[in-house]
Image (cartoon, rainbow, N blue to C red):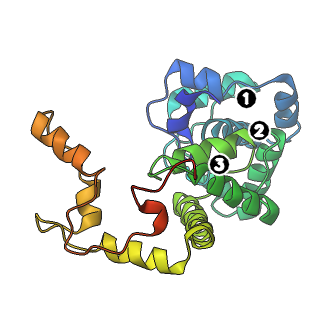
């Protein structure tokens, strides 16, 4: 999907300042969508369904907040559906005492756009996809926006951000478990223990080794760059674990 759509994904309510581009892009309807909208008997239900369809197209999730409906959006919906724009400022009066009507309109809207709620099978697939995405990746902050685009592209209704973050955390935990298992098979538990001890050892400047390794050069200077390259060399720690044979300099690469 186009990257300019990403900021709209996951919105919980109608943005207050929709411009003509947004109104036309998200709240214009195809012939088949109009047929579904016009199949409803009550005019207010038709304009309400149009609102739900447009909101899902914009945000990838169902609309449940009706506090602010911009007047230009009412006008756009009225023009598209052939219904007189309502005098009310919100749709709360339509759904306040009719939760079943709201649920019906939400369901009809996402089915019209061929969206669906996430199944357990899809959830497991998402976690596997996230594990693959995490391979060779140090940061996870951009994963939630990527996950939102993935949901939209696969026409799966977006879930709350906290649930998306939970999926990322679950995938990250599984990825780290698999990585530890691979390292254990490749190098053995004793070597991993030595590495773990080395990472918490203290270097000459008082930092622990892991913090020292992560610290980037503070400025572009020969001194700072030299210190950065020094990190590639054996680290000046007070703890010197015994190096396995494959770390010895005299070991031949051809061997």
Image vertical order of residue 236 relative to residue 115, above or below: below
Query: What residue is pinned by disc 3?
Result: 61
CA distance separating discs 3 and 1: 25 Å
Q: Nearer the viewer, mark 3 or mark 1?
A: 3
State the SS at label 3: loop
Split into 4 quadrants, where in the image is the N terminus? top right
| Residue under numbered circle 1 | 83
Name the one closer to the observer, 223 or 149. 223
Asked whether 217 or 132 is in front, the reply is 217
- Number of residues whose C-alpha sits closer than 10 Å to that of mark 2, classed few (under 14), some (14–19) or many (20 or more): many
**Spot occupied by residue 9 in the image (x, y as percentages of width and height):** 57, 42
Is disc 1 surrounded by few (<14), some (14 to 19) or many (20+) residues within 10 Å?
Answer: some
Q: Badge 3 local density, few (<14 within 10 Å), some, or many (20+)?
A: many
The nearer-to-camera label among 2 and 1 is 2
Do the residues bearing badges 2 and 1 touch, measured as CB atoms within 8 Å? yes
Which residue appears at 71% of the width and 63% of the height? 99
Q: Is residue 141 visible to us here?
A: yes
**Sequence-wise first label, 3 or 1:** 3
- Residue in the image at 88% along x and 30% along y: 35
Question: Whole-percent x and y of residue 226?
Answer: 17, 41
Structural distance between the alpha carbons of marks 2 and 1: 8 Å
Position of residue 208 measured from the top left corner of the image (x, y, whole percent): 22, 69
Asked which secondary structure carries label 1, the reply is: loop
Q: Is label 2 in a helix, a strand or a loop?
A: helix
The circle drawn on residue 138 is none
Task: Identify the disc placed on residue 46.
Answer: 2
Circles 2 and 3, Cβ within 8 Å, touching? The answer is no
Residue 12 in view of the camera: no
């Amino acid at each position: 999907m186009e990257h300019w759509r990403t900021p709209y994904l996951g919105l919980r309510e109608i943005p207050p300042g929709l411009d003509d581009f947004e109104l036309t892009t998200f709240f214009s309807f195809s012939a088949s969508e109009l047929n579904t909208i016009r199949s409803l008997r009550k005019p207010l239900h038709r304009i309400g369904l149009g609102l739900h369809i447009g909101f899902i197209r914009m945000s990838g999730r169902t609309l449940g907040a009706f506090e602010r409906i911009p007047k230009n959006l009412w006008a756009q919906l009225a023009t598209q559906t052939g219904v007189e724009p309502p005098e009310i400022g919100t749709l709360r009066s339509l759904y306040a005492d009719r939760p079943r009507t709201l649920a019906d309109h939400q369901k009809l809207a996402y089915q019209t756009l061929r969206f669906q709620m996430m199944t357990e099978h899809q959830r497991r697939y998402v976690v596997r996809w996230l594990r693959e995405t995490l391979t060779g990746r140090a940061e996870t902050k951009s994963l939630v926006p990527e996950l939102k685009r993935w949901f939209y592209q696969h026409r799966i209704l977006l879930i709350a951000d906290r649930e998306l973050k939970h999926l990322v955390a679950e995938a990250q935990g599984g990825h780290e478990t698999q990585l530890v298992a691979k390292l254990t098979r490749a190098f053995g538990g004793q070597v991993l223990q030595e590495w773990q001890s080395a990472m918490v050892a203290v270097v000459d400047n008082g930092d622990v080794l892991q913090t020292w390794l992560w610290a980037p050069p503070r400025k572009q200077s020969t001194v700072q760059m030299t210190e950065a390259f020094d990190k590639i060399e054996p680290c000046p720690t007070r703890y010197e674990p015994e190096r396995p044979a494959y770390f010895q300099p005299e070991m031949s690469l051809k061997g």
